Amino acid sequence: MPDRLSSLDASFFYAEQPNTPLQVGQVAVFRPERGRFSYQKFVELITERVIRVPRFQQKLREVPLRLSHPVWVEDTHFDAGYHVRRLGLPRPGNDSQLHELAARLLARPLDRERPLWELYFVEGLTDKRIAVITKTHAALVDGVGMDVAQALFEEQPILNIAPSYGEPSTRELVTDALVQLWHRPSQLWQLARAQGARASASHLANALSTAARPAPDLPLNANVGPHRRLALTQVDLEHLRQLRKRHGGSVNDVVLAVLTGTLRSWLSSHGAAPPAGGIVRALVPVSMRTSEGDTVSARLVDLPVGEANPILRLQHIVHTMAGHKETGQSVGADALVRLSGFAVPTLHALGARVASTMSRRLFNVMITNVPGPQKPLFAGGAQLDQVFPVMPLAQGQGLAIGVSSYNGTAFFGFHADREALADVQDLATMTQESLQELKGAAR
């Protein structure tokens, strides 16, 4: 029989809501040479590489009466043209238009009757650039160990992962589920827990809240609607490295310090100036190495937005993160890159899965930072110029922040509920200002 979702994977699948789809996105911008990156060549590239990974041609089929978890089955009507779509921006084709388009596309849930990924080939940008917007469900990423965006790049090996099965009949699905339940009675309990994922997540949140103070009540926490806004910005990675060399810690610590300044400015602009000692609680997924292998665990980090001195903010975060690292062996940036290749979306997806199990009372914002390769990548002869991560929103979380580094640049993606953060573009500007403030204080 086909592969079946694990209880953990199934819990995310059941808990997903129309307003909070659990899918990870990416906005990649290419600078192609003349005629070397057409839509037709792009489709050929994706088709040729995706066909080597059967999981990308499979969909999830639910078992009648939910007698067992969904299974991966072959999409007998698989059509690459459905998943790889061509769009064009009207003139002038600027970045603001691209960001608005990406926000609208990424807000739409994926079609569960088809393989859980989509790519959009966007033409019409200024300077003859081409954008590729990717969207992949977290269940697919975890099941195959890679994101569909990785199929774009020539240097990334594509392995034949997960066998292909034809689509079973309803009778076969029910029979197989009953056989498994007969031989594994404990699966009944696992099944009930997965289908009650929201209750399980709530139970986990209540347990954790007894050991930690609830997150402060901030405008970042809001009821999430179906529409989104997106703001993207980038900074020179070398600036972050120099600050790390001067003040210790890691590049991730510097990123968190920069974003602390960003959130401090944003709160002040909303009449919620943080008091001395005020915090914003961030959920920061961290890659850890354990006896059972590499995994992603959650870290609740209190960002000191009430501290006016940017250097003291950075030192506070360095000290806090050092304490977290003492509880386990963290995986360094270089090791992550060697381990995963260009698996930035994959690691972001694992972070999103962690966030989806946590209560809005425990944290105010999710921040993921994943290092990528520091050399140019190419797709269809076109060089990748920019690559912005877009993290999904969890219920009650009006903002999610993704950070990725590539080829000497750190890329920031601010993904927000359209109503809760109408001024999300200010966060991109404030990030640049926060970095300048930190550099100026360091001098």
Image (cartoon, rainbow, N blue to C red):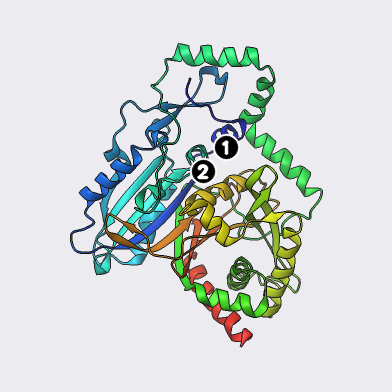
- Quarter of the rendering containing residue 214: bottom right
- Quarter of the rendering containing residue 54: top left
Q: Residue furthest left?
A: 35
Q: Secondary structure at mark 2?
A: loop
Q: Residue furthest bottom?
A: 443
- Per the model, the C-alpha gap separating discs 1 and 2 is 8 Å
Residue at horizontal 58 percent and vertical 45 percent from the top: 353
Image coordinates for residue 424, horizontal then vertical, percent: 49, 64
Mark 1 nearby-residue class (10 Å; few <14, some 14–19, many ≥20): many
Image coordinates for residue 89, horizontal then vertical, percent: 27, 59
Q: Amino acid at mark 2?
A: Leu
Residue at horizontal 44 percent and vertical 48 percent from the top: 107
Task: Answer with left or right where residue 269 lies relative to residue 167.
Answer: right
Mark 2 nearby-residue class (10 Å; few <14, some 14–19, many ≥20): many
Label 1 belongs to which residue? 12
Task: Answer with left or right where residue 55 lies relative to residue 65.
Answer: left
Q: Nearer the viewer, residue 265 or 223?
A: 265
Can you see residue 195? yes
Image coordinates for residue 418, horizontal then vertical, percent: 48, 56
Disc on the earlier residue, 1 or 2: 1
Image coordinates for residue 435, horizontal then vertical, percent: 55, 77
**In the picture shown, does residue 212 fall above or below 242?**
above
**In the picture shown, does residue 418 fall above or below 278?**
above
Q: Nearer the viewer, residue 230 or 54?
A: 54
The quadrant the C terminus occupies is bottom right
Q: Amino acid at mark 1?
A: Phe
Cβ–Cβ under 8 Å for marks 1 and 2: yes
Q: Secondary structure at mark 1?
A: helix
Q: Which mark is residue 22?
A: 2
Numbered-mark total: 2
Can you see residue 310? no
